[in-house]
Image (cartoon, grey):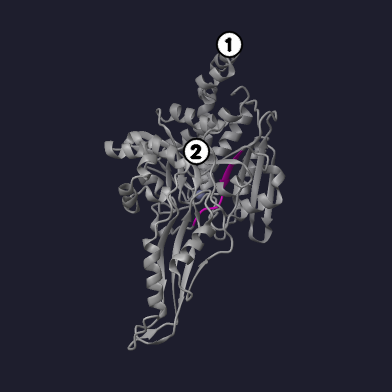
Amino acid sequence: MRTLRGVACCLILTGSLCAQSEFRSKLVPGERIAQYQDLAEQWLAEYLRVDTTNPPGHEMRAVEFYKKVLDSEGIESQVFEFDKGHDRGNIYAVLRGSGKKRPLILLNHMDVVSSDPKRWKLPPFSGQIANGYLYGRGAQDMKNEGLAQLVVMVMLKREKVALDRDVIFLATADEEVNGDGSDWMIKNKPELIHNAEFLITEGGYNFIEGAKVKFVGVDVAEKTTFWLTVTAKGKPGHGSAPMVDSAPNRLVRALTKIIAYQTELKLTPTVEEYLKVMAPFQPKARAEIYRNIRKYLQDPKFRASLPRDELNSKLRNTITLTMFGGSQQTNVVPGEAYANLDVRILPGEDPRKLLAALIKLVNDPNIEIKPQSEIFRKANSSPTNTELFAVFKRVAKEHFGGAPVAPILSSGYTENQRYRELGIASYGFSPYAVATEVSSTEHGDDERIAVDQVRRGFRVLFDVVTGVAATGQD
Ligand SMILES: [Zn+2]
């Protein structure tokens, strides 16, 4: 019945009206939705039992799990075991569309961080349920979302959804350590991914207050790290004979300048839109700032207050002093002293410019400031005026009680950065509504997910995927 009504709607109304008024998951009969819910719960428990702690990873165990399901559903897949000796690999599956639009990639990483079973209520790889929660390392990061992606693939196939674009399922190894799985795909199988228009992976968070989702945060940009080491040199000596220009003294003088240094303020489109969306949730005076951030950035008083404001890191490159080192003994003046700076760079910014500015500021030939790594990944962002982002908004409205979608500039790292470099608009989106005390178990003890979220999340993702990929959605 529902399917028929959906079809009639598409015939009578224009495609876009139909797309706005109906969601695909609503067209799937209730008894079949219940079957998918049971599968989602059963498969996630099974997947959480696969130990892919990284290091060492052993992601081929997860590949095997995925392949078994994909094979039994008749979904074409390819396995890339890129490090045979260490049981590491990726799996790639695809459901073909008409080719009218470019592909959508559903990306998930299969590895998880380590866990200390002694600190857990239930063993981290037991996949057991207690008090309505499914426990397991990866239940938040990100076996939950990987599994939702798998269920969506199975639904698209079983429900015979006609697609305008290929939907690609890509599960990778090693995200938590070096990102070797994604790097391998990008380097060795670019033809399988480079043509994609969109990518969805982890990141993003749906903020809950009480039982209500206040906003749906979608990661569209990330800062990158540009860690620096400051090294001062001077004459070594005895602590009883102070020297004005000792290495530690030079270092402290340099650091005093650096911590007082205010980097240039820069309003990115992501942050401007974020502030507009978040303004209604702020107290009145604060909302005024959020709505008129351009004006406030001209105001010397506001600018001076920013270093103590949580908005600071969204509006500039930041420099945080985190480590010092010098002598091992109180009575020894060392010939060398160092400090480390955690520097985070906004999308579109050139870190070399900041480095040059710091060297000029310190202005001491006995001080060297050097990046800790030769490799620097430029921070990047994805636009918010895309077809997929519009679908996030529609789906958020439908599934999260009208919650607005806030584009997030994240200070953390996700693999989105690597795929954006290929020209793919990449987003961090979570189909789950998770209370903070549960989402904070990610990387912590007792990582878990509410069973009702397991039974719900894949439907949210299914509506996102069909919203942007099913035939007749534009
Ligand atoms: Zn993750």
Image vertical order of residue 26 relative to residue 225, above or below: above
Q: Residue at x 50, y 39 (%)?
A: 429
Image location of residue 211, percent across then percent down: 34, 34
In the foreground, 372 or 11: 372
Q: Residue at x 67, y 61 (%)?
A: 85
**Residue beneath label 2, please?**
41
Give the image quarter of residue 58. bottom right
Q: Amino acid at mark 2?
A: Glu
State yes or no: residue 107 in magenta.
yes
Relative placement, left or right, of 252 versus 199 is: left
Does residue 223 appear in this view?
yes
In the foreground, 307 or 390: 307
Give the image quarter of residue 170. top right
10 Å crowding of disc 1: few (<14), some (14-19), many (20+): few
Does residue 451 appear in this view?
no
Circle count: 2
For mark 1, give the secondary structure. helix
Outermost residue, left side:
284
Q: What is the number of the mark on residue 12?
A: 1
State yes or no: residue 114 in magenta.
no
Q: Residue at x 39, y 84 (%)?
A: 333
Quarter of the picture holding the C terminus? top right
Image vertical order of residue 257 relative to residue 142, above or below: below
- Asked if labels 1 and 2 touch by Cβ distance under 8 angstroms, the answer is no
Q: Amino acid at mark 1?
A: Ile
Image vertical order of residue 124 relative to residue 381, above or below: below
Tell me which segment is drawn in magenta. 105-113
Mark 2 / mark 1, whichever is N-terminal: 1
Q: What is the number of the mark on residue 375?
A: none
